[in-house]
Image (cartoon, rainbow, N blue to C red):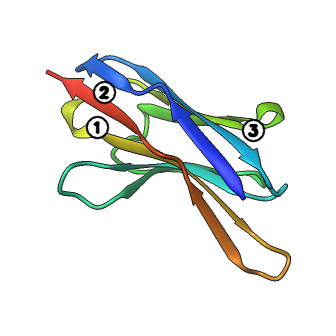
Amino acid sequence: QVQLVESGGGLVQTGGSLRLSCAASGSIFSINVMGWYRQAPGKERELVARSSTVGGTDYADSVKGRFTISREYAKNTMYLQMNSLNAEDTAVYYCNLAQNTLYGAKLSYWGQGTQVTVSS
């Protein structure tokens, strides 16, 4: 099992910044993908950014150039630096960790979510 705990959400004005953190613990494999997803009211959950231990990051087009994902492997922690926030970024942000077992089974874990609200 893997436990994910997010922190860092809150209320910020348009144009402001926030940094989210996700601390992972438990049975974490050396190869995994950690990512940030978000879900706004009435909308489906969507990928914001993700980072693989074997290299490579992906960003949603809507956040490219404004958000930066990073990982601190020694602490099993992932961050999301969010700059130039706007109202469309308002959502609950979820941390996810995905990894495969030796037999190919896909495992996916979610944090409890942290609310980000951008006010104009």
Q: Amino acid at mark 2?
A: Leu
**Which residue is label 1 attached to?**
89
Mark closest to the chain's N terminus, 1 or 3: 3
At 23% across and 20% down in the image, what residue appears?
14
| Residue 102, position as x, y percentages in the image | 85, 76
At numbered mark 3, what does the secondary structure look like: helix, strand or loop? Answer: loop
Label at residue 7: none
Spatial CA distance of label 1 from label 3 is 25 Å
Direction from residue 71 to residue 96 in the image, left or right: left
| Residue 113, position as x, y percentages in the image | 44, 43
Spatial CA distance of label 2 from label 3 is 26 Å
**Which residue is label 2 attached to?**
85
Spatial CA distance of label 1 from label 2 is 6 Å
The quadrant of the rendering that contains the C terminus is top left
Q: Amino acid at mark 3?
A: Asn
Q: Amino acid at mark 1?
A: Asp
**Which residue is label 3 attached to?**
76
Q: Residues within 10 Å of mark 1 (few under 14, many from 20)?
A: many
At 67% across and 56% down in the image, what residue appears?
33
Mark closest to the chain's N terminus, 2 or 3: 3
**Any part of residue 57 in sight:** no
Do the CB atoms of the residues marked 1 and 2 lie less than 8 Å apart?
yes
